[in-house]
Each structure stands twice: as C-alpha cells, then as structure tokens.
Amino acid sequence: MPRIEPLSPPCPAPIDRALRRWMPPGVGHEPIALFRVLHRNPELASRMFALGAGLLGHGLLPALDREVVIARVTARAGCAYEWGVHAAAFAGQVGLGPEQLRATTEPDPTAGATWAPRHRALLDAVDELHDTARLSHAAWDGLRAHYDDARLLEFLVLAGWYRTISQLANGLLLDAEPWATTYPAQGHPHA
C-alpha cells in the first residue's frame, strides 16, 4: 500500500486535465499512480511536468538512448515501479529488445546482451553516477566519443531526473501498475 494514496477518479476538472497531459497520447489506461500522488500537490506536479515532459518528448538524445539510460538508472535504484512503466510503455517502441531490457537489471548489463558502443558508454556512465555521483575522465571520454555538449548535458539531467523519480516511487512504496512489465525476479541491480 502506498504511503500517500493516489487520487482516485473522478478528479476535479483542472487536475483531470493536468493528469491527462502527463500521459502519452492515445494511451488506453488511467494516469499512473505516481502522477496521481504528485497531484496531491498540484503546484509541485506542475513544476515537475515541465522537466519530465521535456526530457521524454523534446530531448536531443535518441529515444533508444534515453530509454537505455532510464532502464539502467531505475534498475540501479531498485525501482521496479518506474522500470516496469518504461519497459511496457516505451522500450519496444524505441527498439530496446527484451534481452537488452533484462540486461539493464543485471549487475553487469554488458555481459548478457549486445550493445552498440554508445550504449555501453551510457551504461558505464550511469553506473559511475549511481556509485559516486561523479564521472571519471574515462567515462566522460566514452560519452564524448558519441555525443555533443548539448546531449551530454541532457544525459546528466536525464540520469539525475530518473534517480529522483526512482527515489520518489520507492519512498512512496508505489505498487506496480497492472499493465507494467514485471521486473525480472533474477535481476539484482547492485543498488
């Protein structure tokens, strides 16, 4: 049971409109619990929307790269909730295959899946950020080989944002969405 109960429909019209804005167009289910909890503080939710929507819908990183980062960040943070939402809603659409998706939950995500060099660099950088909140020169140079300054900045914000989202979902003890991908039982991110 979540520590803060998500709002239940029907919501007042302004909150309902705001919640619908958070969901991708044409989605066939209600707004997710995370968004419905955030709207217990509509002003905070509104401030968070701008960054979250910007990263998902208007970022410079290729969508596949974005989802590789999100999957690894959420796995390293032990956030089955957000990992499952993105696995179900975005992974297949952007070309993140089941083997790769599962590998993001393993201690060494590069051992059990084939990754493009830029994705290996992203995975290494996510792990360093998770472990140290810093990037070594080697990790930075690995990213620099594939991304310009604007995309490097976006990567850092994206990784930090999904760490924040993971802490929020974990801190709230959110239950998995019924339609979300189940986090692999044998996946043990060294969070």
Image: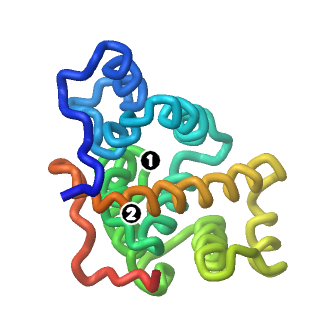
Residue 94 badge: 1
Residue at point 47% right, 74% down? Answer: 76
Q: Quick one: label 1, few (<14), some, or many (20+) residues within 10 Å? A: some
The one of 64 and 166 positioned closer to us in this rendering: 166
Report x, y in % for residue 69. Answer: 54, 61
Report x, y in % for residue 24. Answer: 38, 31
Q: Which quarter of the figure is the N terminus placed in?
A: bottom left
Residue 83 quadrant? bottom left
Residue at point 38% right, 34% down? Answer: 39
Q: Is residue 130 left or right of residue 98?
A: right
Residue at point 74% right, 66% down? Answer: 143
Residue 102 quadrant? bottom left
Report x, y in % for residue 71. Answer: 45, 62
Report x, y in % for residue 30. Answer: 22, 32
The one of 142 and 72 positioned closer to us in this rendering: 72
Amino acid carrying mark 1 in the image: Val
Front: mark 2 or 1: 2
The Cα atoms of the two marked residues, 2 and 1, are separated by 29 Å
Residue 171 badge: 2
Q: Earlier in the sequence, mark 2 or mark 1?
A: 1
